[in-house]
Structure formats: C-alpha cells, structure tokens
Amino acid sequence: MAPMISTAEEAASFRTMAAEAGLKTPGVMIEVPAAALTAGPITEEVEFVSIGTNDLTQYTMASDRQLGSLAALNDAWQPAVLQLIGATGAASHGPVGVCGEAAADPALAPVLVGLGATSLSMSAAALPAVAAVLRTVSPEQAKELAAVATAARSSGEARAAVVAQLPALQELGLA
C-alpha cells in the first residue's frame, strides 16, 4: 500500500511498480484532501484504499498533531473531515478501509460505515467496544448517523448528535 497518494497518476504508477514486483493487490492511502476529492479516478487504478484519518485530519484542518494549541482541530469528528471520508466512500470503486484513531472510536465507527467504510482497522483492545456498538446499528441507521455528523457545525456538535442517537453507547458505558 502506497502512502500519501494525491493523484490518479501516482496511483497508476504505484500499481505498475507493484505489478512489476509481483504484488497482485495494490492499494493506496487516502491521507490528503486532494486524494479524497479525486477518489473515483484514484480507486480505478488500485484494488483498495485505506483512509488514514490521523493524517487526513491534520492536513484538512491545517493543524500539526504535535502542537497542543491546535489539538482541538485534530479531531476526526470535524465535519470537513467526515465530508472528505464520505466523498471517498461514495466515489470509490472498491473496498474502503479506515485506519487511525477514528476507527477505534465506538461512537464514530457507525458514522464511518455510513460514509462508505467497508473495514475498520484498530487495536485489538478497541475491537470489543466497536463491535458491540456496530451490532446495534443497521446500514440505514449508519447512513442516518453519517448525515447527522456531516451536517453538524463542529466536531463537538457532530459527536453529541451521534451519541444521542446511539443508546448502545450508554448501555455499554461508552458515552
């Protein structure tokens, strides 16, 4: 999987290099806004994509993860970030994974599924809570939660609106 792909041409070049190396399933990371906005042509070139939410958030919000004064901007619940994830999901021609801290958030996981994620990559410790919440949400509900989150005015508003619609979070003590 190639990181930091920005264009379909880069994805095609990586696909060629992967084939020359004998790799049959090339994929690329969607980590910059340009790649999210042009996910359709990019995903035509590879077998799958994985959205790197940590980098995508940092580059979308123009905020360094290491700079404490900008910490509030480094939140995958930011509506702009969620809209880019949704654009990627909607335009993709194959599987869309999500990795990074966002995939391990039990409240955010259903939103990511509603935005088109077909797989979520997280630590083993996060899996039980995320799985417990996902079992309570239908695909239609996930899309509704995604719409609520992307329409919010802030990351806090997005999270609060989704949490309010996920009783499983309270039942499991995750809210």
Image: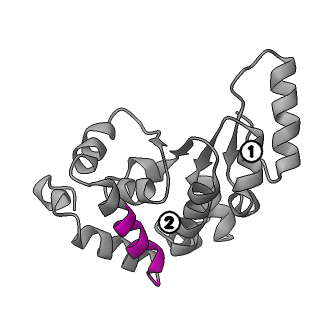
- Point out the tag, 1 or 2, that comes first from the N-terminus: 1
What element does badge 2 sit on? loop
Tell me which residue sits at (39%, 63%) in the image.
143
Q: Which mark identifies residue 115?
A: none
Q: Is residue 99 above or below residue 40?
A: above
Q: Which residues are magenta?
A: 143-153
What element does badge 1 sit on? helix
Image quadrant in which the N terminus is located:
top right
Is residue 66 shown to the viewer in this render?
no
What percent of the width, then of the height, locates residue 65?
60, 60
Tell me which residue sits at (16%, 63%) in the image.
167
Circle 1 sits on which residue? 44
Q: Is residue 34 above or below residue 156?
A: above
Whether residue 146 appears in magenta in the rendering, the answer is yes
Q: Which mark identifies residue 75?
A: 2
Callout 1, which amino acid?
Glu
The part of the image, by quadrant, that contains residue 131 is top left
The part of the image, by quadrant, that contains residue 175 is bottom left
Colour mapping: one colour
Tell me which residue sits at (24%, 50%) in the image.
133
Residue 39 in the figure: left or right of residue 84: right
What percent of the width, then of the height, locates residue 19?
82, 22
Tell me which residue sits at (41%, 67%) in the image.
146
Is residue 44 shown to the viewer in this render?
yes
What percent of the width, then of the height, locates residue 24?
72, 21
